Image (cartoon, rainbow, N blue to C red):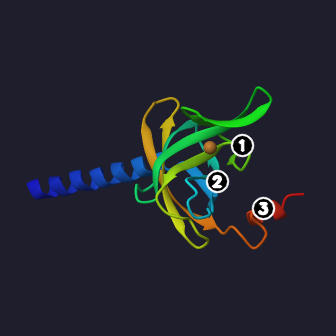
């Protein structure tokens, strides 16, 4: 009898666990990519499209220390007529509207790069989101492929999604 109860408790625990995992997994990240670098380059950007079912805030981003020593969330802003980027504490993601991190806008900044990032490389990035209501935090892992530089196309990293826009 006791073992049966234990089984039931275990089953409930597993169910609760999976429900929790589903509840936390309401952020969708599409088309992540990292801009490739030239040798000795110390920083680059990671870009992606983020959508959500509930109000969340992107509060932190991390990458392996072997790739980037520092990772920050950045915005672009005008400062004395000059477009500059600067760190922000968080980025609000609201339901029903895709937040696009793209060159010239919000981005995840990879700094203190430990190695050159070449086409075909993949950068694992851990994004931490905070539920705006409950303040609970959860992580989401992404694998962002590196788009190659060079070929005379350095100013225009290939981004297939853009080709489909009207
Ligand atoms: Cu930046």
Point 58% across, 47% down: residue: 108
User: Between 113 and 64, which is closer to the camera in this rendering?
Assistant: 113
**Image quarter hosting the N terminus:** bottom left
Residue 94: tell me if it is visible.
no
Q: Which residue is mark 1?
A: 105
Q: Which residue is mark 3?
A: 156
User: Compared to 75, does 124 lie above or below?
Assistant: below
Does the numbered disc 3 mark a residue whose Cβ is under 8 Å from ligand 1?
A: no
* Residue 9 position within the rendered picture, expressed as x and y whole percent measured from the top left: 22, 51
User: Between 114 and 6, which is closer to the camera in this rendering?
Assistant: 114
* Residue 140 position within the rendered picture, expressed as x and y whole percent measured from the top left: 48, 51
How many other residues sit within 10 Å of disc 1, few (<14), some (14-19) or many (≥20)? few
- Determine whether label 1 and label 2 are within 8 Å by CB: no
Cα separation between marks 3 and 2: 16 Å
User: Between 103 and 136, which is closer to the camera in this rendering?
Assistant: 103
User: Compared to 83, does 39 lie above or below?
Assistant: below
């Amino acid at each position: 009898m006791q073992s049966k109860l234990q089984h039931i408790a275990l089953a409930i625990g597993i169910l609760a666990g999976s429900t929790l995992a589903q509840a936390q997994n309401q952020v969708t990240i599409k088309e992540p990519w990292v801009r490739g670098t030239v040798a000795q380059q110390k920083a680059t950007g990671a870009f992606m499209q983020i959508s959500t079912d509930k109000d969340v805030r992107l509060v932190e981003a991390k990458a392996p220390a072997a790739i980037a020593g520092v990772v920050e969330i950045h915005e672009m802003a005008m400062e004395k007529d000059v477009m500059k980027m600067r760190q922000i504490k968080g980025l609000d993601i609201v339901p029903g509207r895709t937040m696009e991190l793209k060159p010239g806008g919000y981005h995840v900044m990879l700094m203190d790069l430990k190695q050159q990032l070449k086409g075909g490389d993949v950068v694992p990035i851990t994004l931490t989101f905070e539920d705006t209501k409950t303040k609970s935090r959860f992580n989401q892992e992404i694998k962002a492929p590196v788009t190659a530089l060079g070929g005379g196309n350095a100013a225009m990293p290939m981004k297939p999604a853009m080709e489909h826009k009207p």
